[in-house]
């Protein structure tokens, strides 16, 4: 039976319009585990800058499901109807393992467990009622749990790439959705042209070169959104303060608790905020957040990612801590009141990733009945430029220490490229 005949409900989404759902999808959505995503903001901290940025992982997950379904239908000659349903379910569940405050919880989770939210998605799919529901409908919970992170070895590479790649449905949804809710204006991207020009060449997801203008717009939009939304200095200040508060309760939440699905699912933005607020030390940081007495950017510098020292700095916690020690000694400000922030930290969502990440996007051209593969950079200088994307290093302190830290940072790191005489 065609999957369209199994749709039993419509949900109205502000980005994609009506999103049809199957019975299996509704049963997954109606679990307590999935409903928790209603209480986890997509962009923790961004609402301090963009008041409309209060959307959640719940609606984003529905959007990713919808786009995965469209991609599955476009590529239906390469997969069965069951595979299309499988990929929709995997897309729906790709973010179910996010902790409170989304990416801001990641350092705490990794430090305590050695795992990230993708690992937690796998655990929650396999060890909660969601897994039982999937098996009720004939799907392997293990297969869904690995496909939702784009690492399912039992399925072709292109199916994993729909979920996790340079042009995956997760990115296609969040760039448009985050732009809409922030009002930042970087979401005018023809994501449907990208999907409708997807094809499979030797089991690898590829784009027809006809979609190149839309692809370039996606890349530009993502870069601009990164600078204006995801790495905005005030949003990051809020996220860093949340990290600071979580550090204060490290000894009170065990690894075993975090790996227990029931306990983990009890953590959302609301419950965790209250937990932190009641804590003696963390509560002081939460009080600052509630009064909007935020960390301030004392220093900022933009540098090219290909600089070897910069790469080391961005990727090494030890190097960052050594820099903090230098700044503390130079300024006289206690080290715990100086924060180094870089885009490669796990708290920064949607960054391009480490410099070793493969940025190539397969393109192809059809000539007669022949398909010719094209290296994207050879026909788009813009895509090649993206490989040289710049990184930003920021030094934060509280307002009362800002000037001392600014002067110390200039002495240690050199002059900034432009004035940082900003308060917001």
Image (cartoon, rainbow, N blue to C red):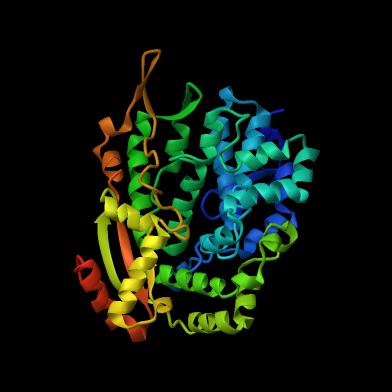
Q: Residue furthest top?
A: 369
Seen in the picture, residue 21 relative to 257 is either above or below; the reply is: above
Q: Position of residue 78 (x, y in %)?
A: 57, 23
Instruction: In the rendered view, tell whether residue 16 sits above or below residue 209.
Output: below
Residue 46 as seen in the image, left or right of residue 374: right
Q: Nearer the viewer, residue 422 or 276?
A: 276
In the rendered image, the vertical position of residue 77 relative to residue 403, given as above or below: above
x 31%, y 72%: residue? 326
Question: In the shown orientation, is residue 373 left or right of residue 36?
Answer: left
Q: Position of residue 188 (x, y in %)?
A: 38, 50
Residue 407, image x, y percentages: 23, 78
* Residue 184 visible here: no
Report the front residue among 181 and 100. Answer: 100
Evaluate whether residue 347 shows in this view. yes
Q: Residue at x 20, y 67 (%)?
A: 414
Give the residue drawn at x 60%, y 68%.
269
Quadrant hosting residue 320: bottom left
Q: Position of residue 153 (x, y in %)?
A: 60, 31
What quarter of the picture does the N terminus occupy? top right
Left/right of residue 263 with respect to residue 296 in the rendered view: right
């Amino acid at each position: 039976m065609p999957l369209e005949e199994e749709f039993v409900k419509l949900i109205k989404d502000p980005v994609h319009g009506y999103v049809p759902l199957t019975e299996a999808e509704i049963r997954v959505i109606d679990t307590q585990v999935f409903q928790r995503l209603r209480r986890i903001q997509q962009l923790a901290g961004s609402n301090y800058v963009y008041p409309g940025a209060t959307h959640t992982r719940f609606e984003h997950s529905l959007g990713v499901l919808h786009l995965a379904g469209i991609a599955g239908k476009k590529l239906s000659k390469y997969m069965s109807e069951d595979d299309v349903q499988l990929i929709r379910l995997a897309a729906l569940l790709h973010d179910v393992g996010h902790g409170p405050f989304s990416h801001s919880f990641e350092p705490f989770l990794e430090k305590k467990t050695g795992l990230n939210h993708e690992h937690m998605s796998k655990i929650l799919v396999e060890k909660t009622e969601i897994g039982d529901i999937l098996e009720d409908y004939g799907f392997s919970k293990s297969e869904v749990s690995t496909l939702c992170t784009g690492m399912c070895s039992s399925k072709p590479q292109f199916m994993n790439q729909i979920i996790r790649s340079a042009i995956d449905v997760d990115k296609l949804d969040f760039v448009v959705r985050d732009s809409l809710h922030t009002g930042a204006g970087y979401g005018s991207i023809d994501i449907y042209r990208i999907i409708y020009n997807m094809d499979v060449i030797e089991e690898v997801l590829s784009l027809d070169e006809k979609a190149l203008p839309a692809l370039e717009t996606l890349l530009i939009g993502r870069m601009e959104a990164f600078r204006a939304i995801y790495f905005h200095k005030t949003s990051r200040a809020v996220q860093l303060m949340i990290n600071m508060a979580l550090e204060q309760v490290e000894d009170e939440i065990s690894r075993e608790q975090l790996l227990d699905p029931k306990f983990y699912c009890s953590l959302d933005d609301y419950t965790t905020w209250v937990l932190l607020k009641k804590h003696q030390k963390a509560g002081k940081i939460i009080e600052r957040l509630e009064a909007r007495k935020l960390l301030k950017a004392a220093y900022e510098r933009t540098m090219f990612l290909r600089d070897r020292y910069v790469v080391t700095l961005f990727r090494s916690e030890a190097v960052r801590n050594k820099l903090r020690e230098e700044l503390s000694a130079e300024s006289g400000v206690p080290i715990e009141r100086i924060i180094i922030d870089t885009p490669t930290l796990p708290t920064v969502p949607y960054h391009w990733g480490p410099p070793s990440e493969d940025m190539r996007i397969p393109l192809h051209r059809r000539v007669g009945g022949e398909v010719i593969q094209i290296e994207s950079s050879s026909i788009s200088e813009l895509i090649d430029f993206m490989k040289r994307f710049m990184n930003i290093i920021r030094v934060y302190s509280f307002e009362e220490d800002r000037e001392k830290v600014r002067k110390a940072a200039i002495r240690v790191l050199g002059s900034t490229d432009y004035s940082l005489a900003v308060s917001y």
